[in-house]
Image: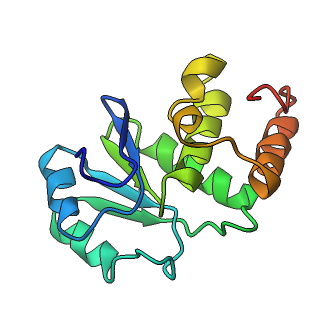
């Protein structure tokens, strides 16, 4: 797994990364992951053609939530929350192009849905990047909707 771009094992049921290659999906399946969630756009520079077919041919489920890098939407975040909640009993692999979209969504999921302490919820985002611009605005908007301190991740 360590050869997959920006790979992080969050816990025994969740891993995140940048875009795996077509060949790396076989290793993900062999490691027991049963669901792959892709947050990248199909036009991203490293997108894998026929990714859904590859993943499903390996016996895993596939969910694609294409999230705009320039304009991430709360609706996409909430859809991600729904997919993650439905998959609580599964091993889940979440990826985008560079693990930046994913790490932000996972941070918000761990903070807002699971209620993890801030330091724990921020992993792996804190190891990858500090969201700014549209992504900082998304964090503030999401937390404000739930009455949480919007800048608590700073």
Residue 59 sits in quarter = bottom left
| Rendered residue at 66%/66% (across/down) | 69
Q: Position of residue 41 (x, y in %)?
A: 54, 74
Residue 51 sits in quarter = bottom left
Q: Nearer the viewer, residue 4 or 102?
A: 4
Q: Residue furthest top?
A: 117
Q: Is residue 116 left or right of residue 44?
A: right
Q: Position of residue 70 (x, y in %)?
A: 73, 68
Q: Position of residue 36 (x, y in %)?
A: 35, 57
Q: Is residue 51 left or right of residue 140?
A: left
| Rendered residue at 33%/83% (across/down) | 49
Image quarter hosting the C terminus = top right
In the picture shown, does residue 15 fall above or below 72?
A: above
Q: Is residue 82 left or right of residue 111?
A: left
Q: Position of residue 120 (x, y in %)?
A: 55, 21
Residue 12 visible in the snapshot: yes
Q: Is residue 108 left or right of residue 60?
A: right
Q: Residue furthest left?
A: 30
Residue 116 visible in the snapshot: no
Q: Nearer the viewer, residue 102 or 81?
A: 102
In the picture shown, does residue 79 fall above or below 149?
A: below
| Rendered residue at 66%/51% (across/down) | 78
| Rendered residue at 25%/67% (across/down) | 55
Q: Nearer the viewer, residue 15 or 88?
A: 15
């Amino acid at each position: 797994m360590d050869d997959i771009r920006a790979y992080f094992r969050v816990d025994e049921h969740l891993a995140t990364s940048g875009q795996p290659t077509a060949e790396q999906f076989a290793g993900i399946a062999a490691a027991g992951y049963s669901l792959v969630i892709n947050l990248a756009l199909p036009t991203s520079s490293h997108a894998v053609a026929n990714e859904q077919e590859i993943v499903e041919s390996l016996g895993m489920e596939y969910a694609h939530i294409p999230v705009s890098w320039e304009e991430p939407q709360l609706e996409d975040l909430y859809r991600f929350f729904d997919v993650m909640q439905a998959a609580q009993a599964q091993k889940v692999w979440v990826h985008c192009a560079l693990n930046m979209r994913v790490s932000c969504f996972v941070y918000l999921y761990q903070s807002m849905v699971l209620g993890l302490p801030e330091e724990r919820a921020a992993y792996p985002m804190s190891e990858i990047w500090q969201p700014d611009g549209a992504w900082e605005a998304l964090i503030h908007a999401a937390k404000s909707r739930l009455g949480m301190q919007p800048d608590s991740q700073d």
